[in-house]
Amino acid sequence: MARFGRSLGADPMTFLGLSGVGDLVVTCSSPLSRNYRLGYALGLGQTIDAATKEIGQVVEGVNTVRLVKKRAEELGIYMPLASGLYSALFEGASLDAIISSLMAGEQALDVEFAAQDDKQLGSCV
């Protein structure tokens, strides 16, 4: 997401704070989170439609994955996790296939937290 945000003008360091990692931790670890409950249900073998219906509320992560993947493709942004999630949710891809594609990814770094102005980092860049 930092790579996605940076390409749209955001400071990538924002994604290390509460609005990024903080939100991600809560979303992924709290049984009160609709995204967590959907993922748990999918892990138990339910379909996305059945799981969403059982939750009874909008699961914002489903639409976010769809929109982020589409926009990343339009902008040419490398987002292997979004693509993998999309494949799992909407194309029935197996976990093995997704992991294989992640391991054979085109970039060596999975995160990019370089400052917008490379002068801020001096010789580190």
Image (cartoon, helix red, strand yellow):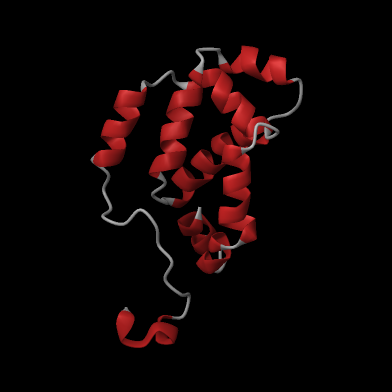
Which residue of the protein is positioned furthest toward the right in this rendering?
Answer: 57
Q: Is residue 119 above or below residue 37?
A: below
Residue appearing at x 38%, y 49% in the figure: 78
Which residue of the protein is positioned furthest toward the left in this rendering?
Answer: 104
**Residue 111: image location, x then y, percent:** 39, 57
**Left/right of residue 118 with respect to residue 61 in the rendered view:** left
Instruction: Please identify the quarter of the rendering in which residue 66 is found.
Output: top right
Residue appearing at x 46%, y 58% in the figure: 3
Residue appearing at x 31%, y 39% in the figure: 102
Q: Is residue 86 above or below residue 48?
A: below
Q: Is residue 108 above or below residue 65?
A: below
How many numbered marks, from 0 up? 0
Q: Nearer the viewer, residue 110 or 79?
A: 110
**Residue 115: image location, x then y, percent:** 46, 75
**Left/right of residue 108 with respect to residue 3 in the rendered view:** left
**Left/right of residue 16 with respect to residue 125 in the rendered view:** right
Q: Nearer the viewer, residue 11 or 15?
A: 15
Q: Is residue 43 above or below residue 60?
A: above
Q: Nearer the viewer, residue 47 or 9?
A: 47
**Residue 64: image location, x then y, percent:** 60, 39
**Residue 75: image location, x then y, percent:** 47, 51
Residue appearing at x 58%, y 39% in the figure: 29
| Quarter of the image where the C terminus is located | bottom left
